[in-house]
Image (cartoon, rainbow, N blue to C red):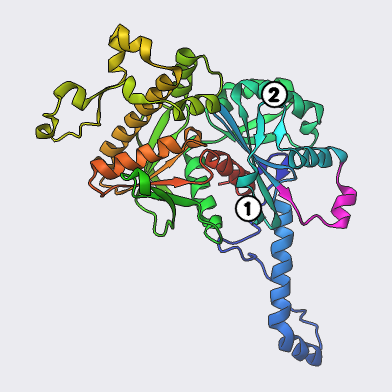
Amino acid sequence: MAFNGHQFDDDILDEDGTPSKQLRPDKEMPESAASAGRASSPRRTSNSMSRLRKDSMKKTRPPFPWFGMDIGGTLVKLVYFEPKDITAEEEQEEVDNLKSIRRYLTSNIAYGKTGHRDVHLELQDLTLCGRTGNLHFIRFPTQDLPAFLQMARNKHFSSLHTTLCATGGGAYKFESDFRTMADLQLHKLDELDCLIRGVLYIDSVMSRGLSECYYFENPTDPDHCIQKPYTLENPYPLLLVNIGSGVSILAVYSENNYKRVTGTSLGGGTFLGLCCLLTGCSTFEEALKMASDGESTRVDKLVRDIYGGDYERFGLPGWAVASSFGNMMSKEKRESVSKEDLARATLVTITNNIGSITRMCALNENIERVVFVGNFLRVNTLSMKLLAYAMDYWSKGQLKALFLQHEGYFGAVGALLELLHPS
């Protein structure tokens, strides 16, 4: 199979990874030599098999650099594998373009005004496709994709690669831009396949050290709510809620058995868009900062605001939101709220809607474990605690809300894995 300008030989290895053909001893070998050979045959066979595996890996793995991309509606997520086991011979043969790209990506934390490398998420000493190195996680706004393509053109990336593995809606939307601006082809991948594959892989490599998965203990008690690690042993079934610009909810029964249950258009893009309109902010981080300083109850109408002190007979807590932005019908209250209050109410509205839909899906699918991922949760502890609270309260402790450290990068990781191990 030809891929990425490189030929893959599907017949080199059996399914268990062992060579499909083994070396046979020479029939003309003298008896004494044959006896000596038999005495050391296990070691020789083992060494031969090891060499064959390494040789076959060299033939099947793509050339460096190794990237995976997830081009979303709001953010582009990029993962880059930096090899750390480069031999002196490889370094001597390595072209300047490849060195330049590696140096640029690994020596910077910021790229221009909006590109960032999340250093705290870096995974070190990973072994991928027979090579050892570090996995880097980089993000930038989708609106700045032309600058990325210009950088790729300036660094002559197309001389090293002809094809990039990419997922997300942008893999389709910007396919022609990659071709015309950077002379690159996109190998477009299914978004949900990449998401599942990325989640399972990152959780497996993180289990060797720090925990990838965590939850909030005592979510209904703000004074004692703390983050705790969680081990995803025997993870199935689970409900996977991917919160990006919009929201997709997947029921996962095994690595290869899952379905999209439902979704909603009210996601991270809705939060940022409304905040830009209501507060004049321009970035996700700015909107979250405003929300953390605001009070949503000045904007929302609560159950107790409608029923007074008689709400308990309806089985509803007084603090529950009865009408998001309901207080804004009053001119007096509109004039008394701050931009921070509006940002907080927007965040609570979006998060509560996601939590409500998720709970209904969990009940319908009879699943008690819910994993939330996506860039909406990046530096967004407010929403994570709200989701944890909602899952725990409304399910009477039956539903556990789980979160993952690498949040929105799983699609890009899945794309990288497809580059290295084409399905």
For the question of whether residue 67 can be seen, the reply is yes
In terms of image quadrants, where is residue 262? Answer: top left
Q: Residue at x 47, y 44 (%)?
A: 196
- The amino acid beneath tag 2 is Arg
Q: Which residue is mark 2?
A: 179
Please give the label number shown on residue 10. Answer: 1
Percent of width and height locating residue 351: 37, 31
Residue 89 within the segment the image draws in magenta: yes
Q: Residue at x 45, y 28 (%)?
A: 293
Q: Residue at x 47, y 31 (%)?
A: 244
Residue 411 or residue 230, whichever sits in front = 230
Percent of width and height locating residue 148: 70, 26
Q: Secondary structure at mark 1?
A: loop
10 Å neighbourhood of mark 1: few (<14), some, or many (≥20)? few
In terms of image quadrants, where is residue 372? Answer: top left
Segment colored magenta: 82-95
Quarter of the picture holding the N terminus: top right
Outermost top residue? 331
- The amino acid beneath tag 1 is Asp
In terms of image quadrants, where is residue 357? Answer: top left
